[in-house]
Image (cartoon, rainbow, N blue to C red):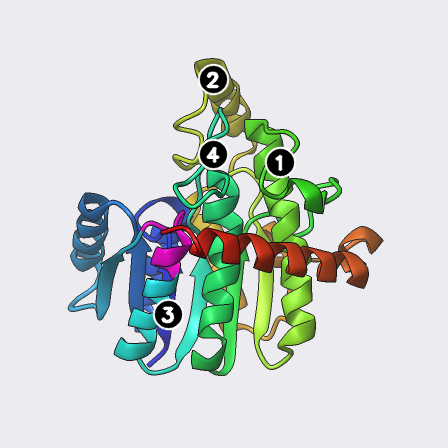
Amino acid sequence: MTIALVTGGTDGIGKAVALQLAKNGAQVIIVGRNAQKGQKALADIHTQVTNPPVTYHQADLSLMHEVNKLAEWIKSTYPPIDLVVHSAGVMLPKKTMTSEGLETVFAVQYFARYLLNTALIGHFAPDARVINISAGGTIPLKLHVDNINSQKMYHGVYTLMHESVANDVMTLHLIREYPHIRFYGYGPFYVKTNLFSNMPFFFKLYSTIFGSLMAGTPQRSADDVLKLATGNHEAGLYARNCKHIHPNKHRTDVKLQDELYRATEKLIQEALSHG
């Protein structure tokens, strides 16, 4: 039986992925910070799947201490993991810092993903797959390693895009470092989810209008994720409909990848030193 870990599995794409995996007979571990939403996600899955082997685990992925605890719990509770789907996300109009000194958007959508990946490296099954739902190489933006903790500037939209580029670059780094694991960066483009719920009214209004014309659904994105999880796609970056994206020279720059790795490790260790 496939053992799958889905972060952000209580809502949006993550919830749709968890449901689809359960329908396919996988043992699914849903991770989220809101226990009420977690229980509702379980109840919703139970209405569509008979006796699904699905569990919910509460964790605040903005905190690196909790990410480490999550990894230790998984290793002590489950046999080697076959699949990890990173879907947890947040978008904030103003810069906020966690109690560990990390900017919240990057903490949830970049640092937590990297730390969970590396903490579980030794607990992955042969030919394990890790799917990072972010940009998939589709955002034409350069990575500024000296701003991955919003040291220089913050803007809600820019920071979300910048985090996506960081995930692309780190995915390519992990592919180099761990060729026995299939790492994927998947960019679903615009999807109708609650990601923008904390943004200002006019931004949400624009997103609603734009979304009515261009947005995909969580189910459509989940279908793509399942294809990456079960098909023969090579590791790399993918867009909607599992279109393989050939990364540009900026993303494939080994020096940039290594610089990002060092900066990421440094900031995570500083975060873990808090408290």
Q: What is the spatial separation of the Cα atoms under label 4 and label 3, in whole angstroms?
A: 25 Å
Mark 3–mark 2 CB contact (< 8 Å): no
Q: Which residue is mark 1?
A: 151
Q: Which residue is mark 4?
A: 91
Rendered location of residue 109, percent (x, y): 49, 48
- Residue in the foreground of this view, choosing between 75 and 89: 75
Q: Residue at point 66% right, 70% down?
A: 175
Q: Residues within 10 Å of mark 4 (few under 14, many from 20)?
A: many
Left or right? Give the position of 131 relative to 253: left
> Given the current orientation, which residue lies at the most extreme bottom position?
126
Q: Which residue is mark 2?
A: 205
Q: Secondary structure at mark 2?
A: helix
Foreground mark, 4 or 3? 4
Rendered location of residue 212, percent (x, y): 49, 27
Question: Quadrant location of residue 214?
Answer: top right
Q: What is the spatial separation of the Cα atoms under label 2 and label 4, in whole angstroms?
A: 15 Å
**Among the two numbered marks 2 and 4 on one chain, the one whose residue lies closer to the N terminus:** 4
Q: Which residue is mark 3?
A: 4
Please provide the residue range marked out in magenta.
60-67
Question: Quadrant location of residue 58?
Answer: bottom left
**Among the two numbered marks 3 and 2 on one chain, the one whose residue lies closer to the N terminus:** 3
Rendered location of residue 232, percent (x, y): 59, 75
